[in-house]
Image (spheres, rainbow, N blue to C red):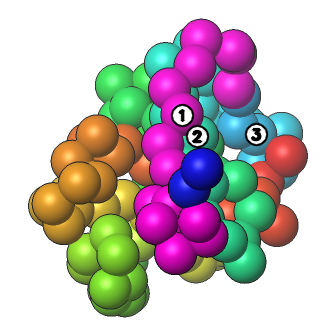
Amino acid sequence: MATASSEPRITLHPHDRRVTVTLDGTLLADTTRAIELREPGYPPRQYIPHDDVRMDLLTSSETVTHCPFKGDACYFSFGDQADVAWSYDQPLEGMEAIAGRLAFHEEAVE
């Protein structure tokens, strides 16, 4: 039986459920190829392939953050709404599956 300390801090769960992301009535993403990332203390996040995101509607932000478990994240804005999504372009070892994918702040999108 695994103990809490031997369980991975972050788990990735690929699935084929449809995930859509809408902001201010605009469809930003639609996929059946998301990976759900689960991390203690945070809500589950859907990481969506760039190919299934309307990247033409997003602009790169100057915001960069660092997670000791995932790596450096770059952010994207939609119109005047800053940093609604982020991506780990070069995630740390063990998190390679989320490279080339975006996650959206569920507080900012529908």
Q: Check whether the beta carbons of the residues at disc 2 and disc 1 lie within 8 A of each other.
A: yes
Q: Is residue 104 visible?
A: no
Q: In the picture provided, is 24 more to the left or to the right than 79?
A: right
Q: What stretch is highlighted in magenta?
A: 3-19
Under mark 1, the amino acid is His
Query: Which residue appears at 32% of the width and 85% of the height?
Result: 68
Mark 2 neighbour class, 10 Å CA radius: few under 14, some 14 to 19, many 20 or more: some
* Residue 7 x/y as whole percent: 51, 61
Circle 2 is placed at which residue position? Answer: 36
Q: Give the SS element for disc 2.
A: strand
Residue at mark 1: 13
User: Is any atom of residue 41 visible in this view?
Assistant: yes
Q: Nearer the viewer, mark 2 or mark 3?
A: 2
- Mark in front: 2 vs 1: 1
Work out whether mark 1 precedes mark 3 in sequence or the reverse, and give the earlier one.
1
Q: Is mark 1 on a helix, strand or loop?
A: strand
Residue 86 lies, with reference to residue 63, above or below; the image says above
Task: Determine whether label 2 and label 3 are within 8 Å by CB.
Answer: no
Closest to the observer: 24 or 32?
A: 32
Q: Is residue 33 left or right of residue 101?
A: right
Crowding near the residue tagged with mark 1, few <14, some 14–19, many ≥20 C-alpha atoms within 10 Å: few
Q: Give the SS element for disc 3.
A: strand
Q: Which of 44 and 105 is in front in this view?
A: 44
Q: What's the residue at 70%, 38% (across, down)?
A: 21
Nearer to us of marks 1 and 3 is 1
Amino acid on which disc 2 is placed: Glu
Which residue corresponds to the image point at 26% horizontal and 75% vertical from the top-left? Answer: 71
Q: Mark 3 points at which residue?
A: 22
Where in the figure is residue 35, as x and y percent of width and height? 50, 34
